[in-house]
Image (tube, rainbow, N blue to C red):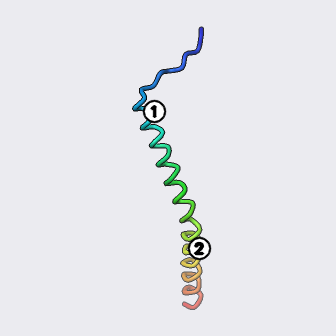
Amino acid sequence: MAWTTPRHDPDRCRRRLQLLAELAGARAVLQRERPQRARSERLRLLIATRKRIAG
């Protein structure tokens, strides 16, 4: 039994590549924003801890 590769519609391939490119772009944006988000999260935690201690 021979393996055959499915033949895809050219429009489907184009849409798939476009979707993958958009996902990669969105992932890159999230990776750029994460350090700021992590820093602000640590700052919020520090402020909350300080308020509890100062009480």
Q: To which residue does mark 1 refer? A: 13
Residue found 48% across the figure and 39% down from its top: 17
Q: Quadrant of the C terminus?
A: bottom right
The picture places residue 52, in percent across and down from the top left corner, at 56, 85
Residue 23: numbered disc: none
Q: Neighbour class for label 2 at 10 Å: few (<14), some, many (≥20)?
A: few
- Which of the two residues, 31 or 55, is positioned nearer the viewer here? 31
- Tell me the kind of residue under disc 1: Cys
Residue 42 percent across, percent down from the top left = 59, 75
Figure check: 6 above or below 51: above
- Binning the other alpha carbons within 10 Å of mark 1 as few (below 14), some (14 to 19) or many (20 upward) gives few
Q: Residue furthest bottom?
A: 54
Q: Is residue 16 above or below residue 50?
A: above
In terms of secondary structure, where does tag 1 sit?
helix
Q: Are marks 1 and 2 in contact (CB under 8 Å)?
A: no
Q: How many marks?
A: 2
Identified at 56% across, 71% down, the residue is: 36
**Residue at x 57% of width, y 77% of height:** 45
Residue 48 percent coordinates (x, y): 54, 81
Q: Relative to 17, is 43 above or below?
A: below
Judging from the image, what secondary structure is the residue with disc 2 in? helix
Which callout, 1 or 2, points at the residue further toward the start of the chain?
1
Left or right, 21 with respect to 49, comes to left
Q: Where, by quadrant of the figure, is residue 12 drawn?
A: top left
Is 55 on the left or on the right of 9, as rendered?
right
Mark 2 sits on what residue?
A: 39
The residue type indicated by label 2 comes to: Arg
